[in-house]
Each structure stands twice: as C-alpha cells, then as structure tokens.
Amino acid sequence: MERHFRVWRGDSSGGEIQDFDVEVNEGEVVLDIIHRLQATQTPDLACRWNCKAGKCGSCSMEINGQPRLGCMTRMSTFEEDETVTITPLRTFPIIRDLVTDVSFNYEKARETPSFAPPPGVKPGDYRMQQIDVERSQEFRKCIECFLCQNTCHVVRDHEENKAAFSGPRYFIRAAELDMHPLDDRADRKEYAQAQQGLGYCNITKCCTEVCPEHIKITDNAIIPMKERVVDQRFDPLVWLGRKIFRRDGMENAPAPVGAGVAAAVSASSSRPPEPPPVNADGKLDVAELLSSQAGGPSPFGDDQEFPLATGGITYHHPEPDKD
Amino acid sequence: MTTRIERHHYDVVVIGAGGAGLRAAIEARLAGKRTAIISKSLFGKAHTVMAEGGAAAAMGNVNSKDNWMVHFRDTMRGGKFLNNFRMAELHAKEAPERIWELETYGALFDRTKDGKISQRNFGGHEYPRLAHVGDRTGLELIRTLQQKIVSLQQEDFAETGNYDAKIRVFSETTITELLLDGDRVAGAFGYYRETGEFILLEAPAVVLATGGVGRSYKVTSNSWEYTGDGHALALRAGATLINMEFLQFHPTGMVWPPSVKGILVTESVRGDGGVLKNSDGKRFMFNYVPDVFRRQYAETEEEADRWYTDPENNRRPPELLPRDEVARAINSEVKAGRGTKSGGVFLDVSTRMPAETITRRLPSMYHQFKELADVDITKEPMEVGPTCHYVMGGVEVEPDSAAAFGHVQGLFAAGEVSGGMHGSNRLGGNSLSDLLVFGKRAGEHAAAYTDALAKRPKVATGDVEAAVDTALAPLSRTDGENPYTLQQDLQAVMGDLVGIIRRAGELTDALKRLQELKVRVANVGATGGRKYNPGWHLALDLRNMLVVSECTAKAALEREESRGGHTREDFPKMSPQWRLLNLVCSLDDSGDVHLERKPVPKMRGELITLFDRAELAKYLTDDELTEYDAAAEEAK
C-alpha cells in the first residue's frame, strides 16, 4: 500500500520538505520507509542508522515533530491516511537531509570528568552489591541517541546556552558516577551544578518523555542531584550562617529581617542569589509543564531570550572557594 | 591532483571502533603511541552494542570449578577442534584479567551475592561463565571502552591542552585503501562520510578491527557497516584469510515482523529457561542432539527442567547446544513443514516463568519485542529462525601478536575480522572476550612493531592518486548501475546459494554469478555529490563485499565435509581428514581469489591431554590418536 511521506532534504545552506509516495508493508517501521526511499527513489538521501533494533541510538529524527528513533516507530502507530513528516533533529546543525552535527554531545562528554578508580583496589578485587550498582546501571542503559539533548528546551532554539549547559545525557552520566559505589570523586553534584549547568534545568521532564530506553532522567538523576546540591549549598540557614560568620565586608550589612534571605547581602553585589523555591519539607516542587508534544514551547514563555540580561538574574553560580 | 586531501601522521591507526578497535587503541596509547581510531559510524555506535548475553571468562565466581582449562576445552569443542589452539589458549587464560580491567574503567557488571561479577550460563559453556549486565552487555562494554578513551583524552588535555594530542577518534570516516611501502604498511586512505573529503593517515602500523561480513546476506543481524572492509583491505595489502567458509547463523533471529527480520533474540532467553517448540507444540530439540554431545545433554524434558535449578545433578537442556546445532535443527523443522507461518519456530518463555521474572531478567528482549513487533513475550511465544550473525573466518594472524600473515608487515587484526580463534563455530560469549584479549594484544604488538622500525615507511604519491580515482569513479558514472540493486542481488546469491545448507552445484553457480556481479560492480554509479551520500558509500563498499563473498563461496565449495558453520548437504559428515586442513585465501596479481590448503597447527601435548581420548576419537584421525596416546603416556 502506498502512503504519503514528507521528508526534509537539504544541507546547512537550506532545504525544504519534499513529498514522496512510498510503498508500506505490514509490520514496518519508519526507518524501513527511508531505506525503501533510498533504494528506489533517492539513493543519496542521508540518514544515520546502524542496528535497526533500538540498541545503538543512531537513527534519531523528528517524526511528525516528535523526537523519535526511526527504527522504533512502527508505521501501525499512525492513522491509515496520515501523512508522516520526517525532519532532522532541530537542536543540532544540519549536515545533510536527516543527518545533523551532533559533535556538541561529544564535546560535553569530554568535559565530564571520568570514573575515578578507587586507589589501592586491584583489578579483580572490586566488590559491589547488586542493589548498589542498579541505580547507576539504569543510567548506563543510555544508548546516546541524544533525543533528550535535542528536546531539552534549554538548548533547543537556544544556541547561546550550549556553552554552559551539558544537557540531560551528561547529567545522568554525572549521576551515574555519583551513585557508583566505588567512584573516588566526591564532588560530582557540585561539579554538575558549577560546570555542567544543572541549574538551568527546571525539571520539565521533556527528556524523560522522549527517552527510548525509558530512563527516568528527571526523577532518578536530575532531581536527586539538585536536591543534594540544595542541601549542601542553598539551605537558607546554612547559607545565612556562612555569610554572617565570614568576615568579607559583611559586618555592616543590615541584619536579616525575617524571611528575606536576599536582605542579608550587601547592595554592592549585582543581585544576591535567591534560594530555590522549596516547599515545606525543604524539597523542590516538581512542577510539570505539560505540552501536546515533547520539546514543545519553552516553559519560560516564548518571548523569553537567553541568556537573561545580567541585571535580571537572581542567581549566582556558586564559586567553590568563595561561598 | 586537484582534490584536497587532509594528511595526518600517526604511529598506530586502528580501523574500527568496536570493542576490539577501542581496546587496541587504548593499549597503543598506553604504550605512548600517537593513535588514530577510525570509526565508520559515530563514536560508540559500533556493532558490539548488539552483543547481549555476556563476555565469557573463567573467573569462577559462580562455580569455583571453572578455570581456563575448562574454558579452553569448551572453546575447542564448540569450534569442532578446528580452532587455532594457541589463540583459544591465550583467550581462555587472559579473559578474566581483561574483564576485571574493565571494572577499573568504570564498568558495572551484575553482581553475585558476595559482590563479585555475576556469571551466567550459555550455550556450549560447561559452567556459568558469562560476565553480563542484564542483556545489554555489549553496550556496557562499548560504553566503558569509549569512556576510558575519553578519560585518556582528558589526561592528555591536562598535560598538553589538547584532547586529541595522543589519541583521536575520526568518526564517520571510512578507509578504502591501505597504502604500502614495499611490503610494509605506510598508511591508510579514506574519506569523511560527512563531507566526502579525503583523508590520508600516514602510519607504520595499522590494526584492523572492522568486524564481519553479514551485509552480504539477506537475513542478517549485522548493521550496514558489516561489509567485510577489513577482510578486503587485508587481502589487497597482501595478507591472507582463513576459514572463510565458516559463517555462524545465529539460531534465534526474529522472523516477524518483516522489518526486523534477522534481529537477534539473545541466547540467554534459552539459558534462562526459554524452550523451542515447533508448530505442533513439540519441544523438538531432543531429537537433534548429535552423538558427540549425547553425554552432556538431557534426554527428557523433566531432566532438562531440573537443570535450571540443580545443574550439579542434571544434564543441560538441548536448547543450549552450540549455535550451529540449534540453527540446523530449526532449519530442519521448518523444512519439514513444522514451522510457523513466517518461516520460523516458537521460542517460549511465557509459560516457563512469571511475567515479572521475564521483565527483570530479559529487560531489553521484552522491550525489543514489545516495541518492534508489538509482541508481549510474557504472554505469547516469539517467532524465531536462523540469521547470519558472525563470520568465524578472517585475517590469518600470528596468535601471540595478532600480526597478519602473508607478505605484509605492520598489519594487525583483532576481533571478528581476524580468523582462527573460533574454529568452525563460535560459542556465545566468546566474542566479547575475544575482542578484549586480542584487541589488547594487537594494540600492544602494533606499538612494539613501530618501536622496532628503523625508518618510517613512506606513502607513494601515485598510490594516493590511484586511491582517489577509485573512490571518485562511481560519482563520475552518472548512468552507472544502482548500488542498492547490486547489493540486493549479491545478498540473494549469498543467501540462496551460499547460505546455511550448501550443495556443490549451487556453490559453483554462486561463483559464476559472483563473477557476473563483479563486472556489474565495476560499473556501479552514484548520484548526488560527495556530501553524506549513502549511495556513493555503498557503491564503494560493494567491491569489498564481493571479494569476501568470493572467498566464502570458494572455500565452501572446496571443503567437502560438514563442520560447525559450514554444512554441506552432499557431505553431511564431519571428516577427521578435513580437520587437519585450513583453507587460506589470498589475492593473486590479477586480483582474483586464490585458495590453498594449509595444515592446522598441532596442539601441544599438555593441551591435548586435557581432553578425554573418547571425545577426541570423534574428531581426530587414527594417526593423531596414536600420537595422543604417546603424549598421554609421557604425561604419566
């Protein structure tokens, strides 16, 4: 049976969506249709793929606007007469047709500190309990399809945030190492906050929704990482105590009045950090912004530009030796 | 020459970024060599991710009776004694160290109760031996090695300010030609897929780790990359290939839906209790236990079922016979009309264990069937059949150094592209450990080779020009033949005529058709320019697929017996005389495949005496048995 497809074709200089009518058989997936297009109509249609079994994470694309793996999207999930539109990942620069330049991810991978083996433990002497490795194992299921990176609104359509933001893939890498029973580094969370831009994430869970491996990126990696950072750094009382007992020109600051933490800081600082909006039990509220499609509109509002103007930011990245 | 070529200097170039390639690169970099890794896909997407079951290593964590000698025996048995014994020995001895080393890179294997690496049962392995992570062990392995390389790059960055100072990954890059200076490797030539620009890597040592040849088959578990590039590069550089007639057809590939035909259902489904049934609902494997294995396998369903919980006092179920036996059995059932509608048999776990056990022990299988086929394996059986999975044959190498034989120096090979280790049939779990053991050895010896060189071999400009012309040729033939059609035709020839069951007439026919295809491939065309053009890439891969297919067909016609991954309907028996012979392919001056017979290296006395005489009697000639008796006598 012939079905109607629309496929984006072009390169970094521009392109357009082209229309195709292609044979579709029972039990096929979108990647099969692309292969049929290559074999019969467009031999040079560029598309990445490898395993065709949802294990390698190569055939990431946007199908009817949804970030998906081409090999895991069965044709039977569409209506019989539905037109299927296939476009490349939006967050990464186009190389050709459905192939994008995903080097951003590999750069971030390089910047993420590696596993630090425990000193003095010889190969063969590693001992860990199954229950302790399972938490990290969940994140090691990641097939690096980069759909989470593609859908994350911090960088989707916000090229300017890419330098400071590693993205969900590397938050789970940091979480994986943080939870690794034998990893020798103790500052994975602080690092994620200070260097990977964890603070940009406002837990809209878009990454979790698109993960083909069903890794609970937000609940099991990002939120625990944020919570601990909150405990250690931004607990208002801890923070206040630290400020009061330090002698860095704070003596003359007006005494804190009641709740307003910001009041404790001298006016000379650009704007003082505000604590995160924690609820009664000291945890962050998990607010879901629902959208009809994953990676949809920006939760900050469509008119919000990043980075925010310096004066408008109420948040400082913590600097390890200062606060 | 008007074409721009990017030039690089390295000490060691590793072609292939799967497990073997990455392990080799790590070792070369640790030896202080400037190392390049060529990856045909993105970094970390290699076919190694498809390995599910685990990595076999006799650590003895689950059953303390296990040791390298038992593993060695299992490997030789599985390969029907055609294995290069020295490779099997090194593999069995070194696999545990290689696995433990991965933990220091950050790997997280499943654990035993006392916190050690857990090990699972697998076809052909006497004891639970496969280190594993659920059913995604290959992914864990590739990710661990990938992350180790990143950590080495971070060390280099700290020292030099450049991540790529000592080890660089060229992702989405294909090598089309090895360049020689006399008999010595001088460099590698290829192109970036992304831009179509050419690249020349000058290096005195090249490690081939390009994997297998499965894309020449219609039904295969292999990805598009598996076009026999390394095999063909080695041949053209003057190296030799052995055992090319031995292809492993994995017994359980998915047969429905059509889009996923060929994709693997891991053997651990059977290791964990899954059973094979025909369309009559009969557990047919009991009818297919060959005499050589009779003693180790259960004869009744009751005994087989008891084995899962009490392996000490019961024999294993016949579903866990080596892969070639199971593949042939399924093939026979389907041919006898007892198959499913889509030409497979049923593999059932749903009636064997509770749903929650299935989803816990086989998570990615559950996931794969649910998402790809809309089949819930906790409720209904899977439909499976044989799929082309692995090539046992490959580059003939010196076992200790992984250096290629033939008249070329500076060429090394590890992993699936190398031959000999697995004999006529590979045991499941032995490939992940193979690529670690021999990947390391190849990297180490490639580094040592460059140290011993008095002067760097030089690339000849003429050779580079010729390589450019060859690579650009398909683009200039605008009315040349469609590469996809040619690939389908090649797959039809190999699948239909050089498939799981072979006959002399069909093999002769296949060779004739391959010659016809050769003429057509010489006229293949590609449209659409050089930028990320899959049609052009396939056009360039075709000649590799073709020459490797010719080796397979020739060797399959020559070997007049059935053994492991080579079944001849006209010679259904295993022959002790043929066990003495390896078939070795090389290219002659005109570029045609030349085949010769070479003796299989003779096992050392202390190794052969690890086996029972009664078992050896099924494989060896009378002369060899006499020698065995003498060796056994001496050992007393």
Image (cartoon, coloured by chain):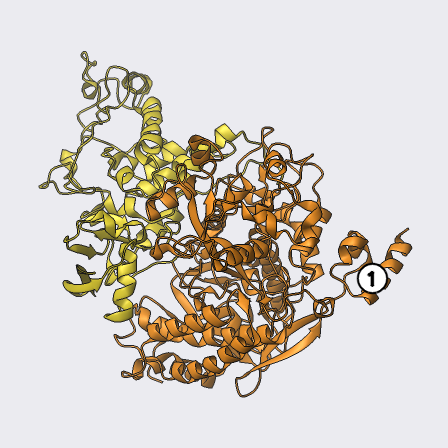
Chain colours: A yellow, B orange
**Which residue is under mark 1?**
B625
Q: The disc numbered 1 marks a residue on which chain?
A: B
Give the quadrant of the N terminus of chain B: bottom left
Is residue B182 found left or right of B495 in the rendered image? right
Residue A262 position within the rendered picture, expressed as x and y whole percent measured from the top left: 19, 21
Of residue B175 and residue A37, the one placed in the foreground of this image is A37
Res. A46 visible in picture: no
Task: Name the residue type under label 1.
Answer: Leu
Total residue callouts: 1
Of residue B428 and residue A191, the one placed in the foreground of this image is B428
Where residue A17 sits, quadrant-wise, is: bottom left
Residue B62 position within the rendered picture, expressed as x and y whole percent measured from the top left: 63, 35
Of residue B506 and residue B235, the one placed in the foreground of this image is B506
Residue B569 position within the rendered picture, expressed as x and y whole percent measured from the top left: 58, 68
Where residue A88 sits, quadrant-wise, is: bottom left
Is residue B444 found left or right of A26 in the rendered image? right
Residue A62 position within the rendered picture, expressed as x and y whole percent measured from the top left: 22, 52
